[in-house]
Amino acid sequence: MVCYELLYREAKLLRAGLQIFAQLVADGHRVRLSHRRLLRNRRVFECSAQLGQTKLKGIDEHAESVVRGVDLLYARQVQALERTGQNERRSRAKLADDVGGIAKRLDPHTWSLRHTTMELTLDTRQTVRVALAEGAMLPEYQTDGSAGMDLRSTSPVELVPMERKLVPTGVRMEIPEGYEGQVRPRSGLAHKSGVTIVNAPGTIDSDYRGEIGVILINLSGEPVKLDQGERIAQLVIVPVTQVRLEHVEELGETERGEGGFGSTGVK
């Protein structure tokens, strides 16, 4: 019996030892698997890092190429501008030479044109579209320095003293936005005949598309007759500004304040 009990206890110890050994073996296997997984993750991480460095390098190279392209484009534009300036200078010099040659042939004693004084003038005037009724005439400037264009009547007009009439001109205009037309009296007509405009200056808004009419009044003591096509007023096109109003309780103070109607004196 003693021998069997000893064998039984040794067998249990052996089985327990085998179980512990098997557990150790399993733990070691799991450790090896974890180690392998860690190595694999490390390799993946290293590959990702290498790929990121490659992409970053590519981005840097692309940025450098873009900068080089911009620099090259800028240099080409500068060269083009320089060539344009040289061509313009050569064109002006050639034009001066051509004019100079003509002037020398015409009057060699009075020739004095120089390249440094040669100027080219560009026409920067606004374009206004005009529609005319039958018998109407296009408004026109009388001189190069005239501020106003003359408006003409489309029918004869007779005004007795202190009489006023709306005189048609047969002109319709498409004034550009940001501009207005001002109808003003003609100084010669006012001085010689005493005829002027009642609402001077009359305003023509840019969105008005009707016929321009002039309200004339005879301030003289005698009847005045105006023929068809006679110049009765002048039209000036000027820029205007619309403002935004803000309601306030007080206004900013000035040295003048509310002084008006001769408050600054006569002389």
Image (cartoon, rainbow, N blue to C red):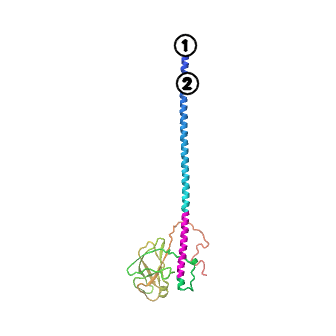
Decide: is 180 above or below 37.
below
Residue 111 horizontal/vertical position (percent): 56, 83
Q: Splitting the image into 4 quarters, where does residue 159 fall?
A: bottom left
Residue 156 vertical placement versus 88 (above, below): below
Please indicate whether residue 99 sits to the left or right of residue 159 in the image.
Answer: right
Q: Residue at x 55, y 22 (%)?
A: 17
Marker count (numbered): 2
Q: Residue 121: where, in percent of width, then height?
A: 52, 76
Judging depth in this view, the residue of 181 and 17 nearest the camera is 17
* Farthest-out residue, left: 134
**Position of the C terminus by quadrant:** bottom right
The residue singled out by tag 1 in the image is 5
**Residue 45: x %, y % from top left:** 55, 41
Q: Residue furthest bottom?
A: 222
Element at badge 2? helix
The three-letter amino acid code for the residue at tag 2 is: Phe
Q: CA distance from mark 2 to mark 1?
A: 24 Å
- x and y percentages locating residue 115 in the rendered image: 57, 77
- Residue 47: quarter of image: top right
Q: Main secondary structure of the magenta part?
A: helix
Magenta range is 75-101
- Is residue 229 highlighted in magenta? no
Q: Is residue 87 magenta?
A: yes
Point out which mark residue 21 bears.
2
Answer with mark 2 or mark 1, whichever residue precedes in sequence. 1
